[in-house]
Amino acid sequence: MKNYILILMMALNSSLLYSQITITEIEKKNVERITMRPPAYDSLKSWEDHEKLSDYKQYVGIRIYCLAIEPTCMISKTPNIFPVDQKFGAYKYDGYGSAAKRLDYKNIMTFKYKPKHISSSGLMAGEDNPIVKTDIEQISDKYYTILNVLYGDTLKVLLKNFYRTLENSSNLRNSNTFIDREEIKYYRDLSADAYIYVLRNDIDGDTLFCSLSHENFILVPYFVKQKQLYEKQNIIYDDEKNSSGDYTWKEIKKADIRYPIKSEDKYGKEISTYKLVNIVPGSKWFCSEVTILKPFNQIIYILKNNQEEQITLSLKSLSSGFIKEEDYNKREMEKKLQSQQLLAKQKKEELIKKENERLVYELERKDCIAKFGLENCELIVQGNVKIGFSKEMCEKAWGKPFDIYKTTTANGTYEDWYFGWKYSLHFSNGLLYKIEN
C-alpha cells in the first residue's frame, strides 16, 4: 500500500511539473547593418539622377562650384540671429482693436545659411514679417566640398531636431526676435525619396545642409576633365549621322554668344542678336578655352577657325556633330583598315570561289569526256549542240528548256524543247534531229 501511494505522488508531481507555463526570452543581439559601397564617381559624367538614394554617396568628397544662382534651401547647422534691416522693418500688433500695441522686431532668427533681410511681407493678419533669403553674393562663385548625403531615417531625425530647436525658441518672440520657419517647414514636408547634401564651405569651413539644384553647381572633377579633353585641341565638325543613323553632312550656323549685337525692335525695346558663322562639314576648329560663361552660368567651349571666326558651344552642341581631330583621325584610320580588311576578305573569297569553280569544271569535264567523248565534251562545254546529241547532252549544253511538248506515234516518241520564242530543239526517240533558231 505504501509503495502504491509513493508511485501516485510521483506521478502527480510529474504532471504538475509539465503543466507549468515556460517563458523563453530571445537573446538580444545587435542587428548587423550591411551598407553597399556606392558606385565610384566617373569624372567623364556630370550630375546624374539615381534611383537608389545611396548612389548619391558617390559624390562624397568631391568639390563643387556654386554658380551665381540662388540654390534651393541652404541651411546652417545652428540657427542664425541677426538684426532686422531698418530699411524694410518688421513688426506685429500685440492685442486687439484699439488696445493693440505695435511691437517692432529687432532681430531675426533663421536656419537659412548666410541670411539676408531682403524685404517685408506687408501687413497681414496683424504682422509685417521680414522676408529672409540666403545672400547670393556670399554663397555664389565659391567652392564647397560634399561631406555626406543624408536620406531616410537619418534625414528625418535631423529635421525633427531643427524643428524642435525653433519650437524651443518661441520665447524669443517676446523679446523682439522674429522666428523664420520657412526653410524648416520646407524640409519638414520633404517626400520619402528626398535627400540633402552636407557641404563644407571651403573658404570659411562652415558646415551646411543643402537640397541643391544640380544645375546650380558644377562638379569640379568633371570641369577639369572637360578642360583636359578639349582645351588646346583641334575639333572637326563631322556631323556624319543623325539620330536615325543616316548620313546628313549638313551645314549649320553658330554664334559667339559672348558678343551680342544690341539693337531695337519696332517698339523701341532693346534686343540682342548674334553674328552667325557658317560651319561646313569637315571644317577644322581650335578649342582655345573651356570655361564658365556668365551670365549664362554654364560650361562653354570657345572655338576658332583659321579665318579667325569664333563660336561658343555648349556641351550638348559640342556633342552633336563635333569630334576631336585625334578621334576623327583614329576613326578614319579604323574605317580605312576595315575597308582594307573587307577588300582583302572579298579578294580571298573571290579566289576561293574561282578555285572551287575550277575544281567543279574539271570534275564535270572529266565526267563529260568519260560519258560523251572528248570531241562532244568540247562542244558541250562551249554551249554548242549538234544533230545526233542525246537529250542529256543537250541539257548539259543549253540547260533545261522552259517548255516541252511530247508526241508518241507508231514510228516512235517525239519531243520539242523550247528555249524562248526563237530557239527550239526537236528529238526523235531521244536523239536530236532538228535545230531551229
Image (cartoon, rainbow, N blue to C red):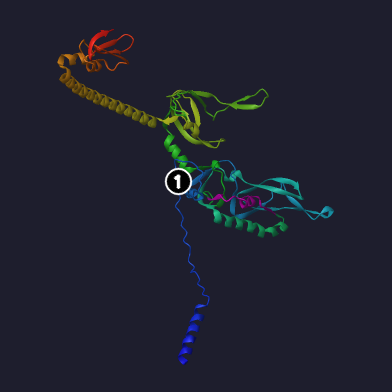
User: 89 or 280: which is nearer to us?
Assistant: 280
Q: Which residue is located at x 71 percent, y 57 percent?
A: 173
In the shown orientation, is residue 171 left or right of residue 29? right
Q: Secondary structure at mark 1?
A: loop
Q: Amino acid at mark 1?
A: Tyr
Q: Which residue is located at x 27 percent, y 17 percent?
A: 399
Furthest residue to the front? 410
Does 416 sit above or below residue 115?
Answer: above
Tell me, yes or no, whether the highlighted magenta stretch contains residue 196.
yes
User: 246 or 3: which is nearer to us?
Assistant: 3
Does 263 sit above or below residue 166?
Answer: above
Furthest residue to the bottom? 2
- Viewer can see residue 87: no
Q: How far across and how far down the image is residue 107, in percent?
A: 69, 53
Which residue does the numbered mark 1 point to in the structure image? 41
User: 153 or 306: which is nearer to us?
Assistant: 153
Does 172 sit above or below residue 196?
Answer: below
Q: How far across and how far down the image is residue 186, in percent?
A: 63, 50
Furthest residue to the right? 98
Q: Which residue is located at x 16 percent, y 14 percent?
A: 375
In the shown orientation, is residue 28 left or right of residue 386? right
In the shown orientation, is residue 38 left or right of residue 403? right
For residue 400, what is the image quadrant? top left
Q: Quadrant of the C terminus?
A: top left
Q: How far across and how far down the image is residue 304, in percent?
A: 46, 27
- Viewer can see residue 83: yes
Magenta residues?
178-199
Tell me, yes or no, whether the highlighted magenta stretch contains residue 332.
no
Q: How far across and how far down the image is residue 397, in percent?
A: 24, 15
Q: Residues within 10 Å of mark 1 (few under 14, many from 20)?
A: some
